[in-house]
Amino acid sequence: LVPLFLISNTGVAYELPLAPIENGEYRLSATGAFDKILTGHIVFDKKVDSVSGGKQLVRIELKLDHSETTIGHSMGFLLAKHADDPNDLKGNYEVSAKAARLSANSEGAFGYADINALGEQPFFADYGFVHISAIDDKLLHGDLNMTLGNFEGQIIEISGSFIATRSK
């Protein structure tokens, strides 16, 4: 009984492993102006447009909405890529100034976040990426690492993983 007491009071912190992410969910770690774990539901839409030169511009929209167990927030990401095959969408989508303008032919990533606890000012992606590791007709697997800022100078960094389901 005494050895158990000595071992159990060592002061070493142990963290329990996180549960795996289910289809239609995300888990993001936010730091900076806001230090929290953000979880919720995520869906995606895919749109394919023809552009000159025989290539196609594929756009993927990710919509994230908070779960009941986390602080109120919503986020969205628009990813765009020129592709010969509209089903070959794996890879990194970098935040760029061109993507921020949302022009018809721009490639990259654009993102925004509204965090209720930080007021009315939305946050917009400054730099970072969204990585797609797998995609089919129903699911999109990926992760992201992004820095977002607002017009008041607040900055948040978010990173984590998601498994988006196709919106209905």
Image (cartoon, rainbow, N blue to C red):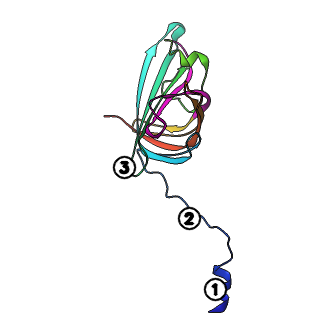
Which residues are the magenta region?
105-130
Quarter of the rendering occupied by the C terminus = top left
Residue 78, horizontal then vertical, whole percent: 48, 26
Quarter of the rendering occupied by the N terminus = bottom right
Residue 39, horizontal then vertical, whole percent: 46, 47
Q: Residues within 10 Å of mark 1 (few under 14, many from 20)?
A: few
Look at mark 2 in the image and give the residue it sits on: 16
**Amino acid tagged 1:** Phe
Residue 107, horizontal then vertical, whole percent: 56, 19
Mark 1 to mark 3: distance in Å? 38 Å
> Number of callouts in the render?
3
Query: 143 or 75: nearer the eye?
Result: 75
**N-term-proximal mark, 2 vs 1:** 1
Look at mark 3 in the image and give the residue it sits on: 68
Q: Which mark is residue 100?
A: none
**Amino acid tagged 3:** Glu
Query: 96 or 89: nearer the eye?
Result: 96
Mark 2 to mark 3: distance in Å? 22 Å
Look at mark 1 in the image and give the residue it sits on: 5
Q: Is residue 2 above or below residue 21?
A: below
